[in-house]
Image (cartoon, helix red, strand yellow):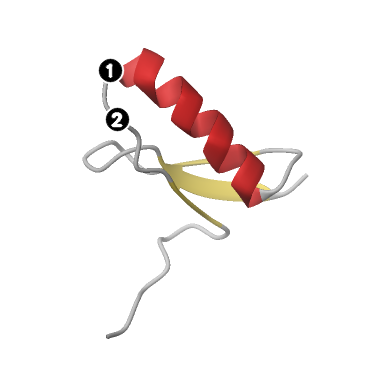
Amino acid sequence: MPQYSYQPAPGLPIKTTTFGGTAEEFAQALAEDCRGDHGVEPEVRVWTGPRPPTTTT
């Protein structure tokens, strides 16, 4: 099963878990849970590996 790191919304802790589907499916499931569990509008970030990906401009 793939392992993903994720952050459901800005300011929430980054966590790691396994999920049987794709990263897109996992992000969609997190977005649905985020509203109920945390009461915030989701801005889900999902990636493989322990740290967030970096971006360059």
* Residue visible at 46% across and 45% down in the picture: 6
Element under label 1? Answer: loop
Q: Secondary structure at mark 2?
A: loop
> For mark 2, does the 10 Å Cα neighbourhood hold few (<14), some (14 to 19), or many (20 or more) residues?
some
Q: Position of residue 15 (x, y in %)?
A: 44, 40
Furthest-bottom residue in this view: 57
Label 2 sits on residue:
41
Question: Horizontally, is 37 left or right of 10 in the view?
Answer: right
Residue that sits furthest to the left in the current view:
11
Could you say which quadrant of the image residue 9 lies in?
top left
Q: Is residue 41 above or below residue 25?
A: above
- Alpha-carbon neighbours of circle 1 within 10 Å: few (<14), some, or many (≥20)? few
Residue 4 versus residue 17 in the image, above or below: below
Q: CA distance from mark 2 to mark 1?
A: 7 Å
Q: Quadrant of the image for the C terminus?
A: bottom left
Determine if residue 39 is in view.
Answer: yes
Residue displayed at 25% across by 43% down: 10
Please give the name of the residue rendered at 26% of the width and 25% of the height, measured from the top-left corner: 40
- Residue 41 image position (x, y, % from top left): 29, 30
- The answer to whether any part of residue 17 appears in the image is no
Q: Position of residue 25 (x, y in %)?
A: 65, 41
Say what amino acid the circle numbered 2 marks.
Glu
The residue furthest top is 36
Residue where numbered disc 1 is placed = 39
What residue is at 58 percent from the left and 59 percent from the top?
A: 48
* Most foreground residue, 17 or 28: 28
Q: Relative to 7, does residue 50 appear above or below in the rendering?
A: below
The location of residue 11, given as percent across then percent down, is 21, 40
Number of numbered callouts drawn: 2
